[in-house]
Each structure stands twice: as C-alpha cells, then as structure tokens.
Image (spheres, rainbow, N blue to C red):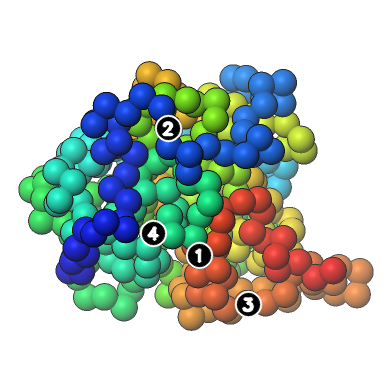
Amino acid sequence: MPSFVANANQHTGVKALMDNGLVTIPGRYIKPPSHRAVKHLIVPGVEIPVIDMAALESDREEFVQTLCMASSEWGIFQVINHGIPVETMQGMVYGVLELFDLPIEEKMKYYTEEVFVPVRYCTSMTPSQETHMEWHDHFQHYFSNREKEHPWPEKPACYRRLASSYVSSVKHLSQTLLSALSEGLGLDSNCLAKSFGDSEMILRSNYYPPCPNPDLALGMNGHTDSGGLTILFEDQVGGLQARKGDLWYDLKPIKNAFIVNIADQLQILSNGKYKSIEHRVLVQPDQTRLSIVAFCNPSRDVVIGPLPEFIDQQNPPLYRSTLYEEHITNVYTKYLDGKHSQKLQIN
C-alpha cells in the first residue's frame, strides 16, 4: 500500500478548512466569472429519462430501445429497480463517511496526484496544476486487473467489507448496461465490452462540505467523463447539473436510484451515436453533499477509436484513435473543463 507523507506543499482539503472554522473561501477556490453558475441559465428540477431495469426481463427489445434513446438524446439517465440492495448502497455511504471522518494525518497517508495508484486521497482534481480549484475532497480506488488483490485502507475497519460488496454489485450492473448499449447499436451484446479490453474501474467518493461563498465556487467544473460508462450514487442534497446547449439542467435525484451517464469512450466508439454529456456540481452554503462514482473504463493499453461498423463513405470517422492511457492521463493533468472528446475530433 502506498504511503504519502504530508508536507507544507500538500493540500489537506476543504473539509479540513471547514472543520477549522473557515468563514470565507481562499482565493484559489474562487472561479472566474465565466465559470460561475448563472441563475438565468439554469433550468430547475429537471427529471431526466428513467430506465427501469425490471423491463429488461419483461420486454428486452423495448428496454434496449429506451436505453438507446436516452443515451443518444441525453447521454444521462436514472436507473431504478437495478437489483442492488439498499443495504449495500447505504452501507457504502456509511463506510465513505467514516473514511472522510478519519484524522487528517491518516488520510494524508494516501495523498497523491498520481492517477494509477490503488488508493488516492486528494482535494480538487490536480491542485499543483490548477489555478482555480474545485470545492471537494475525494478518495479514489483504481482497480486494475493486473493486481492480484486490491490494497484497501486499514481504517476504518468496516470499509473494506462495505466497499468490496458495493464494487461487486456495481460491476455487474455496468456489464448489464454495456451489453444492452451494444445491442442498441445493432452490435453483438459483448461488442463494447470486448472493445474495452481487460476493463478497469475507478471508484471515486466525492465529499462536498458546505461552502461559505457558494456563488463564487464550484464543487466540480463543467466536464465530460473521460472513461466509458459512469454510474453515480448520490444523496438527496442535489447540485448535479447537466448541460444541453447553453442551459444547465438541475437534475432531480430519485431516492436509491443510480444516475448513469455516457462517457467519452462510448461516444468515440459509437462515432457520435451515443453522447457524453457535460455536467458540473454546485455547492451549498449549509449542506454537505456526498457522491460515490464508479467509472467503468477501457483498459489503459487499449487503443480506442470509432468502430468499423459505423464507418463508410457517407459516415467518416469523427474521432482519431488514441491509446486510452494517454487520454486519461492528459485529462487528469490539465484543468477539468468542457468536453474532452472534442480534443480527439477530426476537423
């Protein structure tokens, strides 16, 4: 297990700032006016498409069609009747809160800005590279099929058991959705999974404490996810917004549902048929927000490009092929902003 010793140049996080009685946010967390939330461009209380997993057994064809439409028109949807027990989801929430409540000295053992480490604690995204930081802390697990056994944090004692159960359940859900998404493109059910190679997962828990100046900050800047498929479980505080055109839609979470969004690699593989959607997180003046995000990604050593089934004389490739490791490393070492797939577009 990696150990990272705290020093004066490392950032202990925004939770530590608030625990110490912060009343005004530091300058590095103040977003430039062009990146702040503008009220007249926000559409409140939007209900995005809802995918009922129970329909997968009763009418698979209709289920696939509904899923395909949500993925191409919105790129984000909520999943209900997913089969993951509420106890597993709430157990994960409990374990994550216990993790963030550890003494800062314990959390800083895992402090790093490296992407491909088994356990990472950090604040914002990549503090050393950012001019304007994000108002959140996070713990991140990188699950590679190269490792024999994942090195879990030793504390809290309950965390390994709770997180292992959650990861196993979410992996199964991601595989089910990926199969249906393949069918929605007219492909074999295992086509997208095969394109991912020896697929990997990043599990990231985000902690957004109350912010003294929420109108000046963002929990997370507007961005698309760089991986394949993202499965998010959040509390009922809200703050997640998705962008369509110039408007930001304030998403209304369904209790015990998952929010799933298409990420860049599925947009690229489908040559633009599926859409990765830009999203961001607002912060609250008096509430803590927690989200648990599973990024279901291709293997680092896989080259991702438009599938040949979608390329012909009338439909040229919209994106250039690239090694996935290069893409995700580039995303993590730059300012989180906008649609990352645009950087791979062929002009």
- Left or right: where does residue 142 sit relative to residue 72? left
Image point (20%, 51%), residue name? 107
Q: Earlier in the sequence, mark 1 or mark 4?
A: 4
User: How far, Cα to Cα, is label 4 from label 3?
Assistant: 20 Å
Instruction: Please name the residue shown 72% across and 60% down the image.
Output: 342
Disc 1 is placed on an element classified as loop
Q: Which mark is residue 25?
A: 2
Of mark 3 and mark 2, the one earlier in the sequence is 2
Q: Residue at x 64, y 46 (%)?
A: 277
Q: Which residue is mark 3?
A: 322
Q: Which residue is mark 1?
A: 333
- Identified by mark 2, the residue type is Ile
Amino acid type at circle 4 is Ile
Image coordinates for residue 239, horizontal then vertical, percent: 50, 28
Residue under pointer 4: 202
Residue 41 visible, this orientation: yes
Question: Does residue 75 appear left or right of residue 154 in this picture?
Answer: right
Amino acid type, callout 1: Thr
Q: Identify the secondary structure beneath mark 4.
A: strand
Mark 1 or 3: the one toward you: 1
Of marks 2 and 1, the one in the foreground: 2
